[in-house]
Image (spheres, grey):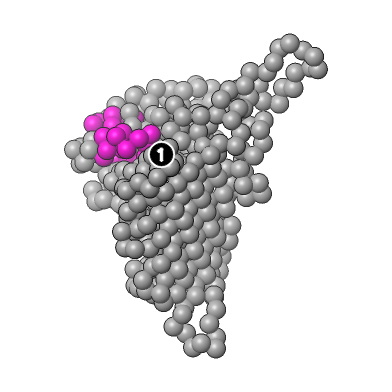
């Protein structure tokens, strides 16, 4: 009888949708060591989570995450809530012996991340942070090429994560815009991703110097957006203070001597989910652009000098020599954002069955948090900070 892995997922927003799709699809495309059951989806709003249960294909719905964590049937807890609840839920799940997949950033602070890692290690559960972009086939190929030494000594890691969903001042003051629920803004939300890719592809950060900035300092409270008060009316609209960054930038040094330059913003008008990465080394360079996510651009400085140039590697060869793509379609049939979550879940399921670690673990999450917090301290004190 094949092992069954029953999943309880907390949160049903954008990430709940992406993760639900991944839990449903992974078994159909990857050789998993267990059957996956979408057992319970949990959210505070009963009507909302019931609708999500039907839409996303879960067996049960719940409104109290403790019911999910304490259920003897659930073996895996998938956390997709606002950042302020990651630690409490993950620690309770670990103490209940559940394997935990947690959305990024792992926590609100380094202290919380360390507590989550300690609880996971003590409970001997499998723990993973959903830095899904590591499992873009082109990024996984870049990792393989760098590990083989094709770039030689790494000089530069240059990364930009640019979105513009906050460029409208009418976008309301949701949880990602408030420090007490999000911890930080673009910094912990999307800089966390390119920090993780820097750690994955280049190495550990040694020291950083950064700045955080908020362009739009007030926004309409939820429910007030778009309501323009009639001219001359006394009832001013209810606005709230934005307490997190709109944009974060930092430079830094890796322990291996490479230099880092990262920028994350949610006000880059025209950029919807733009992630560009360039890594320059002594023997060559790699360039990646998420808006063209099946393509990795490679400059091999060891080719004959009359034909040097960046060339395109379309990372979709189905003969299994490129990571993940062999499980999908014939060569050249491209993949998308949702596949990165399916790859993440597939590796997580097999790790849970085997009881083996799977990166990025909560330790990676803690190291990410250490970089995030060092940049915040640097920005506050306007000085370099060692990690
Ligand atoms: C919002 O910025 C967001 O949903 C991030 O939280 C995700 O991690 C990223 O993949 C897409 O944008």
Residue situated furthest left in the rendering = 122
x and y percentages locating residue 206 in the rendered image: 32, 54
Is residue 37 among what the camera can see?
no
- Using a 10 Å C-alpha cutoff, classify the residue at mark 1 as few (fewer than 14 neighbours), some (14 to 19) or many (20 or more): few
x and y percentages locating residue 346 in the rendered image: 38, 52
**Residue 2 magenta-drawn?**
no
Magenta stretch: give its range.
89-117
To which residue does mark 1 refer? Answer: 381
Is the residue marked 1 within 8 Å of ligand 1, measured from its CB?
no
Give the number of callouts.
1
x and y percentages locating residue 170 in the rendered image: 67, 30
Nearest to the observer: residue 1 or residue 310: 310
Nearest to the observer: residue 328 or residue 81: 81
Is residue 235 among what the camera can see?
yes
Image height of 131 relative to 260, above or below: above
Q: Residue at x 74, y 22 (%)?
A: 228
Nearest to the observer: residue 270 or residue 351: 270
**Residue 110 magenta-drawn?**
yes
Q: Is residue 245 left or right of residue 100?
A: right
Q: Is residue 185 left or right of residue 31?
A: right
Residue situated furthest top in the rendering = 234
Label 1: which secondary element: helix
Residue situated furthest right in the rendering = 231
Image height of 139 relative to 263, above or below: below
x and y percentages locating residue 379 in the rendered image: 44, 41
Q: Is residue 183 left or right of residue 17?
A: left
């Amino acid at each position: 009888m094949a092992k069954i892995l029953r999943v309880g997922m907390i949160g049903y927003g954008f990430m709940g949708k992406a993760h639900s799709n991944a839990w449903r699809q992974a078994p159909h495309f990857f050789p998993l060591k267990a059957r996956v059951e979408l057992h319970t989806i949990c959210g505070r709003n009963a009507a909302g989570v019931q609708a999500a249960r039907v839409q996303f294909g879960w067996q049960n719905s719940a409104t109290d995450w403790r019911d999910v964590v304490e259920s003897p049937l659930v073996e895996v807890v998938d956390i997709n809530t606002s950042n302020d609840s990651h630690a409490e839920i993950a620690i309770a799940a670990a103490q209940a012996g559940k394997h935990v997949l947690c959305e990024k950033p792992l926590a609100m602070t380094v202290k919380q991340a360390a507590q989550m890692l300690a609880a996971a290690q003590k409970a001997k559960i499998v723990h993973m942070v959903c830095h899904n972009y590591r499992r873009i086939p082109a990024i996984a190929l870049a990792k393989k090429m760098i590990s083989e030494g094709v770039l030689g000594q790494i000089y530069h890691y240059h990364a930009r994560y640019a979105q513009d969903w906050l460029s409208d001042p009418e976008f309301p003051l949701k949880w990602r815009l408030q420090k007490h629920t999000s911890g930080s803004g673009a910094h912990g939300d999307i800089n966390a991703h390119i920090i993780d890719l820097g750690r994955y592809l280049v190495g550990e950060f040694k020291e950083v110097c950064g700045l955080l900035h908020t362009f739009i300092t007030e926004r309409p409270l939820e429910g007030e957006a778009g309501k323009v008060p009639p001219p001359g009316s006394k009832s001013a609209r209810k606005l709230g203070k934005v307490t997190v960054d709109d944009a974060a930038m930092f430079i830094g040094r890796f322990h291996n001597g490479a230099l880092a330059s990262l920028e994350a913003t949610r006000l880059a008008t025209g950029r919807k989910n733009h992630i560009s990465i360039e890594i320059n080394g002594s023997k060559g360079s790699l360039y990646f652009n998420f808006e063209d996510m099946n393509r990795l651009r490679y400059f091999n400085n060891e080719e004959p000098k009359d034909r040097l140039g960046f060339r395109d590697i379309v990372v979709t060869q189905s003969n299994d020599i490129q990571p993940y793509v062999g499980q999908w379609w014939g060569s050249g049939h491209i993949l998308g954002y949702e596949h990165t979550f399916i790859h993440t879940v597939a590796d997580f399921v097999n790790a849970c069955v085997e009881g083996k670690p799977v990166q990025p673990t909560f330790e990676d999450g803690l190291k990410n948090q250490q970089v995030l917090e060092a940049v915040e301290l640097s920005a506050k004190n306007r000085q370099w900070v060692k990690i």
